[in-house]
Every structure is written in structure tokens, then in C-alpha cells.
Image (cartoon, helix red, strand yellow):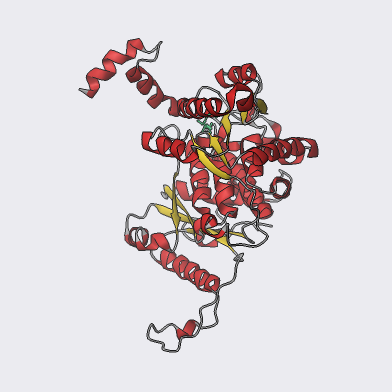
Amino acid sequence: MILPPDIRRALDFLPFGVSDGSGAFDALRSEAEYANALLHTGEGEGADFLGWVGLPSAVTPEVLDGIRAAADELRRRAEVVIVIGIGGSYLGAKAVMEALGDPFASLSRERREGGDHNSPTIVFAGHTLSEDYMASLMEAVEGREVAAIVISKSGTTTEPAIAFRIARQHIERRYGAVGAAERIVAVTDGACGALRTLADEAGYKTFAIPDDVGGRYSVLTPVGLLPLAVAGVDIEALMAGARRMEAATAPDVPFAENPAAMYAAARHALYGAGYKIEILAAYEPALQSFIEWWKQLFGESDGKRGRGIFPAGAIFTTDLHSMGQYIQQGERTIFETFLSVAESRRELRVERAENDGDGLDFLAGRRLGEVNRKAEQGTTLAHVDGGVPCIRVEIPRLDEGALGELIYFFEKACAIGGYMAGINPFDQPGVEAYKRNMFALLGKPGYEAEADEIRKRLG
Ligand code: PA5
């Protein structure tokens, strides 16, 4: 179970202490508790999008069975499954898959005894408009048994819509309309949108995204669970982890035991003290996409009204050799949250060498994970000494349960922090601006009025 984050090395940077008698910390705690309560009473802004709050405890075994059955069907039929979506409609699944996956699966698959040889390769599409990316992907799936999961809550987002048209036409050419309907699953709104209409007309299997769950809070719905089940992830264990965190962050849990409230309060106080950039840093490369999911969750929720913490990410120690200098001595507006994994899944020790020419015999017999943890401890102290407040969130290991806890923990903290900042953490009005210009430039019907003016501005 994730413990409440260690915020001691962040509080030291605040102009008030936990018990300095100023009452500032008590006020912060009350604000976090109040914000958390609002998420449960539904009296805050954006209350139409609170479906994710009780999702882990509300999901039934039948719902998970239905998702697993659809996933098994795709696993049976396909060597490659194209998962199509953008933003909240793909980042969560990618994050969990990578965190649990083997980075060298393609090399080790044939060699390993007893592994899951029937697991299809998952590829992502619809998150980019890159012609090269999509053309390579379609070339790579040529001649292979292929299936697709298309995910779009609105059903109208341009990037996944284009990718789906390309993938669908490929699948229809290969298997015919009936065969395609057995290989395409759509995850979208229960009633509206172009994708819903298209899926119903074509007879695709569909899963509905609950109306009251927004994209970036949707990984624990079929949006994330279906692709994860196809990848062989234990989705019940993931939900069980999320359920544990739901209980641990309930409104009646005291502040000091509520991980999400503590993290939200620490971030809020640091922002108020001038720390405007947060780096989520992990020491496991497998967490790279998890950091991308986190960046979207917090960036899209917080960045409004000319305010908000800028969420950045780093993988250490790799990025200590690129961004380390800036973090140590650059502008002092950064704070860090270390996402620490207590136990490695595999074991590898540094062996003694006949000739200690590289001078590493002092490490002989020690696990690489221990070296990594010492790097984390050393970095934390160095960065604190350099003027960077540090928060630490520890998970026991990279498994489904811990990731389920972590997902819910960050979602809850993000929503609490949004309410503390006085914004609606569930909308994203700013995302529309680029779309309007792009549609006008592409000549989409309905955008004629803007087109001339935009073209003039581009010169
Ligand atoms: O968090 C969000 O709401 C967004 O990131 C969406 O998930 C993203 O824009 C994709 O939207 P849709 O699922 O409607 O295609």
C-alpha cells in the first residue's frame, strides 16, 4: 500500500512550519479536507464529472468479465491490436502496459520458456498526425492478423478519427465487412457522436464510457481496461489497488493518513511559495509513459486562468546527465516529486572482476537496485541543498495493485488540488483553440469565416 507521501523536504521550503503556531498549516489542511469533501458531496465545480470518484468500488465482476471476454476474443484473433485514441483515451493504458511490460519483449519472446506466446503486440495510433508514423504502422501490420480498438469519448476527435478510418479500411479490405466487425471494438459515448453512430451501423462490439467520467480520469473504465486486458494485464488486481486507495482517501480519513490530501496540500503550498514547475521523477524507465499520463492529468486539469503548476517529467539517473545541471543550479522555481519503487522485480548483482581496472569492486555482490536507490537518496539531498523542495511517493513494486493505487492517488490529488486552487479540474476549454485554426486551414465545412483571417496571419 502506498504510504502518505513524505513531504518533510518540501515543508522546509515553505514560509511556515507544521507547528510554528502561525495556523497556516492548519488552514492548508482544512482547505484540502474541504476540497476532498466537495468531491464526495458533488457541490464543487464540474460536479457532472465526478463518476471516477466511486468507480473502483462500483465496478462489478460482471463488467470486468465482459471486458475480459471481448479482450480474449481479440487476443484469439489478432497478432497485432491497434489501439486508437489520444490524450486520456490512450495514455493510461500505455502507462500501465509499459510499467508492467518487458522492454525487450521482442527479443526475449521466442527464448523464454512458459511465457505467454499468444499475447498480441499492441501498437498505438490516433495520438499523432504524423504521416510517417501511420504509414510505417500500416506497413508493419500488412500480412498480419490484425484487430483494432478505437477509443474516443466524443467520437469526433480528428486524430483518432483519421487513424481509425485508415485502420478500418485496411481491416475491411482484408476481412470484409463481417470479418471487420469481429475484429473492431469501439469504446465511446453510450448514445452520441460520430463513432457511436458508425459503430452501431457497422455492428461493432462497443463499450460505453460513463457520461460522468472525463477523458483523463477514464483509465479505470473500458477506455483503459479493455486494451490492458488484451495486453494480458490483471485488471481485477488493478481495480483492487484503486479500491484500496479509494478507501484510503475517503473524506473521513484524517489528513495525515490521506496520501492524496497531503500531496495536494504540499503542491498547493509550494505553488503559493513560488515553485511553479513540478518534475515527476522516477528511477525506472518503465515509468516513462506513466509520467506522460501524469503530465496530462495535471496539465489539463491545473493550467487555467493564467495559473497552474507546469508538470514536467524526468527519468533518473538518465536525465541527471541532461537536466541535472539545471535542476541543481538553474532558476529556483522547480520542485520535484520522486516516484520511488521500493523493490525491483528482477535481481542482478555486480560481480567481482578478476581485474578491478574499472574500480567497481567496492560494489561487488550488491544489487543494481541498491545502487539505484542510493542514487535516489543522493540526488534528493543534493537537490534539496540546491534549493529544490522534494516530495517522495513510494510504491512497493511495479505490479497491477500498486499501479491501481497510484492511478487513483494521483486522480484524487489532482482533483483536490484543483478545488484548492479554485478552478474546475474536469474541463479543458483551452484545447479547442488549435483545433479551430486547424479546421479552418484544412477547409472543414463551417469554418469558412475564420479561414481567410488565419491564412493572412500566417502570411
Ligand atoms: O482528458 C481529456 O478529456 C482529453 O485529453 C481527451 O481524453 C482527449 O482529447 C480525447 O478525447 P476523445 O476521447 O473525445 O477523443
Residue under the image location 50 percent in, 36 percent down:
87
| Residue most extreme to the left | 459
Q: With respect to residue 382, does 412 lie above or below?
A: above
Q: How many marks?
A: 0
Camera-nearest residue between 28 and 435: 435
| Residue most extreme to the bottom | 354
Residue 370 place in picture, x, y as percent: 54, 73
Q: With respect to residue 338, does 92 lie above or below?
A: above
Residue 182 place in picture, x, y as percent: 65, 29
Residue 385 place in picture, x, y as percent: 41, 67
Q: Quadrant of residue 76?
A: top right
Camera-nearest residue between 152 and 353: 353
Q: Quadrant of residue 188?
A: top right
Residue under the image location 54 percent in, 76 percent down:
349
Residue 291 place in picture, x, y as percent: 50, 49
Residue under the image location 39 percent in, 62 percent down:
320
Is the C terminus in the top left, top right, bottom left or bottom right quadrant?
top left
Q: Is residue 210 visible?
A: no
Residue under the image location 32 percent in, 19 percent down:
441
Q: In the rendered view, does 275 fall on the left or right side of 331?
A: right
Q: In the rendered view, does 238 fall on the left or right side of 130?
A: right
Q: Is residue 109 visible?
A: yes
Is the N terminus in the top left, top right, bottom left or bottom right quadrant?
bottom right
Camera-nearest residue between 367 and 14: 367
Q: In the rendered view, does 250 fall on the left or right side of 106?
A: right
Camera-nearest residue between 426 and 396: 396
